[in-house]
Image (cartoon, rainbow, N blue to C red):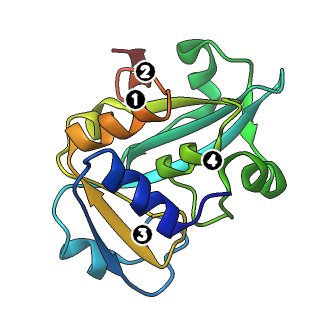
Amino acid sequence: MKTRADLFAFLDAQGIAHSTLDHPAVFRVGEGDEIKAGLPGGHTKNLFLKDAKGQLWLISALGETRIDLKRLHPVIGSARLSFGSPELMQETLGVTPGSVTAFGLINDSDRRVRFVLDAGLADSDPVNFHPLINTATTAVSQAGFRRFLAAVGIEPLIVDFEAMAVV
């Protein structure tokens, strides 16, 4: 599994500018508001999910976005959704609970995880994610984030969670 240093080397190799702030561990949305206040751009919440047919999903959204998992599955074309286990998260994304991040897609070499991107986050610039560990936040431009996704072979499914529709 790739580490934070591996992620930064990958971003550098792709020509993706990034800046990172180290901070105390942040495990969930609502924690670390004082940290976020000093960082411009979209701050994220990330959900690692598994549907009833075994398909894995990663949702990255703005921290304040309300995500109704009971209504989401027909929108994204999945079976009913529930949270994926910590073991499966570690196996596919190389992260532990509290450190879930879109940057974890760098570890999903078998492309087992489908990626859903919040339309609000897709419009944010820059975007802020944990760099595979929850003791830091890494900012990249929206264009840089899209280059990252393309470099790891991911085409995001963009969803407007307010309208509950694919964009």
Foreground: disc 3 or disc 1: 1
Q: Is residue 136 above or below residue 104?
A: below
Task: Write down the residue under mark 4.
Answer: 107
Question: Which badge, 1 or 2, comes first in the chain's sequence?
Answer: 1
Find numbered disc 1 in the image and state the secondary structure of the residue it sits on: helix
Query: In the figure, is residue 160 to the left or right of 142?
Result: right
Q: Nearer the viewer, residue 70 or 80?
A: 80
Q: Could you say where residue 104 lies in the image, as x and y percent from the top left? A: 56, 50
- Mark before the other along the chain sequence, 4 or 3: 3
Picture coordinates of residue 64 (x, y %)? 35, 52
Instruction: Say whether disc 3 or disc 1 marks the residue closer to the N-terminus.
Output: 3
Outermost residue on the bottom side: it is 24
The residue to which callout 2 is attached is: 164
Q: Nearer the viewer, residue 67 or 139?
A: 139
Q: Amino acid at mark 4?
A: Asn
Q: Quadrant of the C terminus?
A: top left
Q: Amino acid at mark 3?
A: Gly
